Amino acid sequence: MDAFKNIMVAVDFNDSLGELMVYADRLAQKFESKVWVLHVADPEPDFVGYEPGPQYIRDLKAEEYREEHRNLQEVCKNFLSEEVKAEALLIQGSTVETVMSEAQKLKIDLLIVGTHKHSFLHNLLQESVSMELIKKAEIPMLTIPIDE
């Protein structure tokens, strides 16, 4: 492969967001790529076996999602160069499955994720999202170590 035309950055709104976006911006400029910034929100409660609840709760959740999407759009605007084409995506679902599904739909050439540094025991007992993505990904991945 000689170029990365579509780069996806999977974010979770932590402090490392800027670090991931710097890498995405540099690569996108070099390869004239489009950057897709993806945040996967929790699925609706009725998808995971709970009752939907009162309408006002659903309205509050919808507003929360709209605000998160606006924040993603701001991330694109603030961290990516003007010449880089970018799109912010906020999708509800299971994180690993949603990232992989969207990467396939969008024909992503490179997936950028952050990895947290944990002890051996922690990693043995609890798998991280980034490790699950590494196991399931069929596309190149760039993992950026994140300081806690």
Image (cartoon, helix red, strand yellow):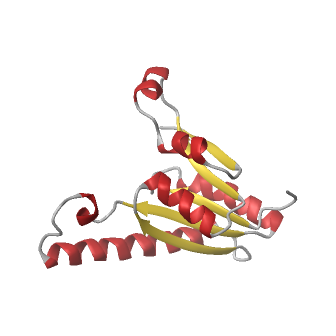
Identify which residue, 145 or 112, lies in the foreground: 112
The image quadrant where one finds the N terminus is: bottom right
Query: Is 96 rendered above or below residue 109?
Result: above
Q: Residue furthest left?
A: 54
**Percent x, y of residue 117:** 52, 33
23 relative to 95 in the view: left or right: right
Image point 62% across, 49% down: which residue?
Answer: 137
Image point 57% across, 56% down: which residue?
Answer: 18
8 relative to 121 in the view: left or right: right
Identify which residue, 119 or 75, lies in the foreground: 119
Image point 40% across, 69% down: which residue?
Answer: 68
**Percent x, y of residue 121:** 44, 21
Identify which residue, 113 or 83, lies in the foreground: 113
128 relative to 59 in the view: left or right: right
Image point 26% across, 58% down: which residue?
Answer: 48
**Percent x, y of residue 116:** 51, 38
The count of marks equals 0
Query: Is 138 rendered above or below residue 37?
Result: above
2 relative to 78 in the view: left or right: right
Q: Which quarter of the figure has residue 58?
A: bottom left
Identify which residue, 120 or 84, lies in the foreground: 120
**Percent x, y of residue 31:** 82, 65
